[in-house]
Image (spheres, rainbow, N blue to C red):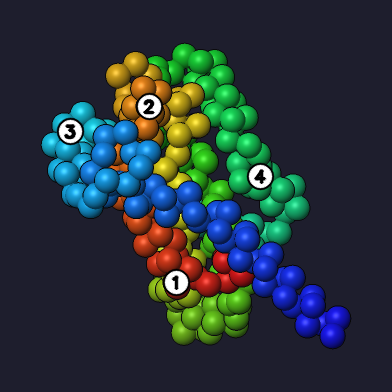
Amino acid sequence: MQANKSSKLLILGGIFTFLFLYVPLILVILYSFNDSRIGISWVGFTLKWYKVLFADSQLMSAAVNSLIIAFVASFFSVILGTFAGVALHKYKVPLLSSLIMIPVAAPELLVGVALLLFFLLINFTLGYVSIVLAHIAFCTSFVTLAVKSRMVGIDNSIFDAARDLGANSFKSFYLVLIPSILPGIIAGGLMAFTLSIDDFVITFFTAGVGSTTLPLSIYSMIKMGVTPEVNAISTIIILFTLVITSLASKISPQLFK
């Protein structure tokens, strides 16, 4: 009897948690199709806000900037994160393992301020390059953790077998190790891409004058009030993020356990 009561409370708690998390997102998606500029009450179904969105050259330019930054940042994050993940698994240095967690565990506000101070210290001009470098510094840790978690399940005897067959260190790394950890690399890359394209706080601190990304543009728009155009672009971001995270969870499910 007590077990049944606990199970019901657990189910109710889970339902409440999911409603708390996803009802606001569902409302954003619904109101992106609302035929009302104010968006307080439902008037009727329409797609005109998506037409307005795609006709907005400034917002589309910001979206393209975000995509380019995300592609470049995730590409270099995958390279650096892969080497870092393999090295941390092989040498197991406790201090380095703790340091790699700092960008993941620390609030983005602190990371953004730290990166801003670093760029000012070295007299680096803020702009798109500084945004890319900041995103690489932030996203590399996530790729490292993904690769490191994938390395745990690898049988090290396959590398001994490769060396017995005449493969040198480079061939062992490229032909044996990379295919073995490829799911972790891809999952880390997808996570890095999603984090980069959605990031606002770090981008806000490291963007220079005239450097505009999609999150920054949305922030400037909502200061004047939430419009259906913001709901439309938010819906696209939500669906895009859902697809990317779903792919990452399918490719490397142990990251989401």
Q: In the drawing, does residue 26 fall left or right of residue 227?
A: right
Residue extending farthest right: 2
From the top left corner, tell me how far across and down residue 140 is, in percent. Answer: 51, 47
Asked which secondary structure carries label 1, the reply is helix
* Disc 1/disc 3 C-alpha distance (Å): 35 Å
Asked which secondary structure carries label 4, the reply is helix
From the top left corner, tell me how far across and down residue 184 is, in percent. Answer: 49, 66
Q: Amino acid at mark 4?
A: Ala
Which residue: 21% across, 29% down? Answer: 58
Dividing the image into 4 quarters, which one contains the N terminus?
Answer: bottom right
Which residue: 27% across, 46% down? Answer: 43
From the top left corner, tell me how far across and down residue 188 is, in percent. Answer: 47, 58
* Disc 4/disc 1 C-alpha distance (Å): 24 Å
From the top left corner, tell me how far across and down residue 132 is, in percent. Answer: 39, 35
Q: Nearer the viewer, mark 1 or mark 3?
A: 3
User: Sequence-wise, which precedes: disc 2 or disc 4?
Assistant: 4
Residue bearing mark 1:
251
Residue bearing mark 4:
105
